Amino acid sequence: EAGVAQSPRYKIIEKRQSVAFWCNPISGHATLYWYQQILGQGPKLLIQFQNNGVVDDSQLPKDRFSAERLKGVDSTLKIQPAKLEDSAVYLCASSPEIGEVAEQFFGPGTRLTVL
Amino acid sequence: AQSVTQPDIHITVSEGASLELRCNYSYGATPYLFWYVQSPGQGLQLLLKYFSGDTLVQGIKGFEAEFKRSQSSFNLRKPSVHWSDAAEYFCAVESNFGNEKLTFGTGTRLTIIP
């Protein structure tokens, strides 16, 4: 089966600009996650969707980050305006369903550099 | 709150030698535990997981891990490493209350020397 797709793979922007990332999860996977991985750290969960509803966004900086998952399939993560500290790899993951322990499948990530 | 500690930031091992990567967790109940591997420019790939039962878990690529409740540890092992094992390894813990929230450690970077 096809894996989790993400685009773009790399993005360089200047601070205060906006940027958007796209994720297409594995077909049929109900749960979608966005993680932020800063260099030298483990991934940190930003937001979790179940179908098109938000399950957990407690660690999402809502003053500048937003995410949506229209129709419960694809998702976009937006940063506006970007700050230097937003430089990181943004990983998208999906899993079959919530309510039971299920493996999360990760995409290759988008590497964001903010200058 | 759950947390994971990987005390070794960087480990260098000779090809063919054995490997052990350490992981300690903090969680109030029996957690779900995972090891992921991340090669440069790649996403995370699941090596193995522990939910319950046998405390010695076998994974892909010849890796295994042992859950030790008394030590709050879940160390990853491989008897003989290959050059292709060079990567970043992450231990993660998940709440068993069904919200599937993974908390990752900071990772251990593995370098293989000939």
Image: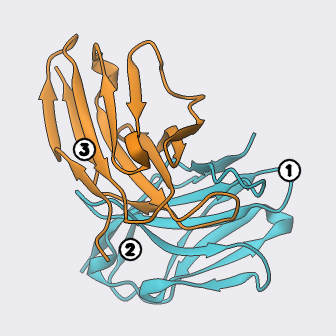
Chain colours: A orange, B cyan
Identify the mark at residue A110; answer none if there is no mark: 3
Amino acid carrying mark 3 in the image? Thr
Q: Residue A60 at what x, y percent from top left? A: 50, 27
Q: Locate the N terminus of chain B by quadrant.
A: top right
Q: For this view, does B56 lie left or right of residue B47?
A: right
Chain for numbered disc 1:
B
Q: Locate the C terminus of chain B by quadrant.
A: bottom left
Mark 2, secondary structure of its residue: strand
* Among the two numbered marks 1 and 2 on one chain, the one whose residue lies closer to the N terminus: 2
- Cα separation, mark 1 vs mark 3, equals 34 Å
Which is nearer the eye, B83 or A43? Answer: A43
Amino acid carrying mark 1 in the image? Gly
Q: Please tell me if label 1 and label 2 are on a single chain.
A: yes
Residue indicated by mark 2: B13
Q: Residue B14 at what x, y percent from top left? A: 34, 79
- Cα separation, mark 1 vs mark 2, equals 34 Å
Residue indicated by mark 1: B28
